[in-house]
């Protein structure tokens, strides 16, 4: 027992030094925004500026697009849309907008605007969120899910996309995030269309749960899966596929009074617990074979432990511990915290990948070759970042953010490594709407931080 307390004390000291966390009063998370922040708070003012920018940058018919230069079309990122652009552009028919669903994207913006409406009471925030929610309902695929980017005209999808899209996206918080956004809109407005669309999305997620309990990156047609297997079909933590699904099912189960959703979430959490690597490297890989061994994915995603995906796994386990009261989900979180606290490549900065056994940071090029630096590796890719790890470790200590720097990040926001010489982010001059969405979400978490984890899951609990 003495060794356990000594280990907890060492970890708490390491985490406190790495994140600069301030202890919070036990009951602070029960207070409203009006109790925590005065009306003239600079933080609240910054939050309002970011929300106003979200309103200003939204499409008139709802949703948000990728970044583009004035007078240029948005550049699509996925193969189906790139192919459509190549076919239609010579005839002047590529006249659709491309709405981004992958996080931080349209669902993230909806969730943040609803928090702004609740906290600040500005009707514009609710109206903008509703227009985006109406678009999400219109864009829902026949499968019940959504794709990472979707072509739209006005308030609905282009005619060809529904029957040419052969993939539904789970990772990058696409379908899970859309479901949470629609459930939040239903809670705010009680409009049945939002709940009905969310229920269809939930049915899709339940259908896609793998025998392991995990979820794949997305849903490919069964005939494609029979013709050839893909890394996209594996049990995966990559880009939050399984973990954001767990968080979404827990939210939906509580809000809709459906206990079977918690059972599905627990199956996913039990898979996460089984898949954790042995100590002292108590992290997780991006994806796994059916026998539980780590597996590669894209050419530049070889077998390794992944810091960002480890943080996602820890968040899902904390959500399960909080929802179920089951302490078995705490021990893996604390073990993973010890690993993450020992692996930064610089203060507040982690590599995405670490070698099994040696903990060496890994970077890969398109030829599956390990290279020495992130700049030599495949681009674009988030090879390094803070990955929300300092913020998450701060919450494990039962603390609260001391400003935006320690506010938790939205899914899909990797966060850069600390750079003291970098200019402060200004949403009014930022070019990319997704950066504004991520910033607004972070401010929302600074204004009203998530509650601390259950006592059994905190570093200070002595576990």
Image: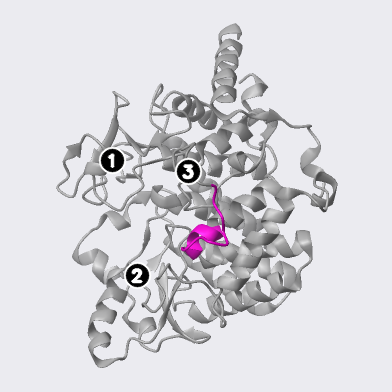
Q: What element does badge 2 sit on? A: loop
On the rendered structure, is 131 left or right of 241? Answer: right
The overriding secondary structure of the stretch rendered in magenta is loop
Image-quadrant location for residue 390: top right
Q: Which mark is residue 148?
A: none
Q: Which residue is mark 2?
A: 167
Q: Which percent across, then down, holds residue 69?
A: 39, 71
Counting residues from the N terminus, which is met first, the one under dot 3 or under dot 2?
2
Residue name at image x 19 percent, y 37 percent: 370
Q: Is residue 282 magenta?
A: no
Q: Which mark is residue 374?
A: 1
Q: Which residues are magenta?
A: 424-437
Residue drawn at (41%, 23%) of the image = 279
The foreground one among 339 and 350 is 350
Image height of 156 relative to 434, above or below: below
Q: CA distance from mark 3 to mark 1?
A: 19 Å
Could you tell me residue 379's position as x and y percent? 27, 52
Q: Position of residue 460 (x, y in %)?
A: 66, 22
Q: Are marks 3 and 2 in contact (CB under 8 Å)?
A: no
């Amino acid at each position: 027992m003495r060794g356990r307390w000594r280990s907890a004390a060492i970890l708490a000291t390491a985490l406190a030094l790495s994140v600069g966390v301030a202890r919070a009063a036990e009951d602070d998370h029960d207070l409203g925004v009006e109790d925590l922040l005065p009306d003239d708070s600079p933080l609240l003012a910054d939050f309002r500026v970011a929300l106003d920018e979200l309103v200003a940058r939204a499409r008139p018919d709802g949703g948000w697009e990728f970044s583009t230069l004035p007078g240029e079309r948005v550049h699509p990122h996925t193969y189906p849309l790139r192919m459509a652009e190549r076919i239609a552009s010579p005839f002047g028919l590529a006249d659709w907008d491309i709405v981004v669903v992958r996080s931080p994207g349209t669902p993230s913006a909806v969730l943040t605007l609803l928090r702004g409406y609740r906290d600040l009471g500005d009707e514009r925030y609710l109206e903008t969120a509703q227009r985006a929610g109406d678009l999400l309902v219109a864009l829902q695929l026949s499968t019940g899910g959504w794709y990472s980017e979707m072509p739209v005209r006005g308030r609905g999808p282009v005619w060809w996309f529904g029957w040419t899209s052969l993939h539904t996206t789970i990772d990058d918080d696409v379908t899970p995030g859309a479901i949470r956004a629609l459930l939040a809109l239903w809670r705010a407005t009680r409009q049945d269309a939002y709940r009905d669309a969310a229920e269809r999305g939930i049915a899709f997620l339940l259908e896609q749960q793998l025998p392991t309990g995990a979820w794949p990156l997305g849903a490919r047609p069964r005939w494609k899966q029979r013709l050839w297997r893909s890394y996209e079909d594996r049990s995966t933590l990559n880009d939050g596929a399984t973990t954001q699904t767990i968080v979404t099912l827990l939210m939906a189960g509580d809000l809709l009074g459906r206990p079977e959703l918690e059972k599905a979430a627990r199956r996913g959490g039990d898979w996460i617990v089984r898949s954790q690597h042995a100590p002292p490297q108590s992290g997780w890989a991006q994806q796994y074979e059916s026998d539980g061994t780590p597996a590669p994915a894209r050419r530049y995603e070889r077998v390794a432990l992944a810091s960002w995906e480890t943080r996602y796994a820890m968040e899902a386990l904390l959500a399960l511990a909080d929802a179920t009261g089951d302490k078995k989900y705490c021990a893996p979180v604390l073990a993973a915290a010890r690993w993450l606290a020992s692996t930064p490549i610089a203060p507040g900065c982690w590599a995405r990948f670490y070698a099994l056994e040696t903990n060496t940071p890994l970077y890969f090029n398109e030829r599956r070759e390990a290279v020495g630096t992130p700049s030599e590796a495949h681009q674009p890719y988030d090879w390094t970042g803070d990955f929300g790890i300092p913020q998450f470790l701060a919450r494990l200590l039962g603390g609260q953010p001391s400003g935006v720097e320690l506010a938790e990040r939205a899914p899909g926001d990797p966060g850069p490594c600390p750079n003291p010489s970098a200019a402060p982010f200004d949403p009014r001059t930022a070019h990319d709407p997704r950066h504004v969405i991520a910033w607004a979400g972070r401010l929302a978490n600074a204004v009203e931080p998530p509650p601390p984890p259950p006592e059994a899951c905190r570093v200070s609990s002595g576990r």
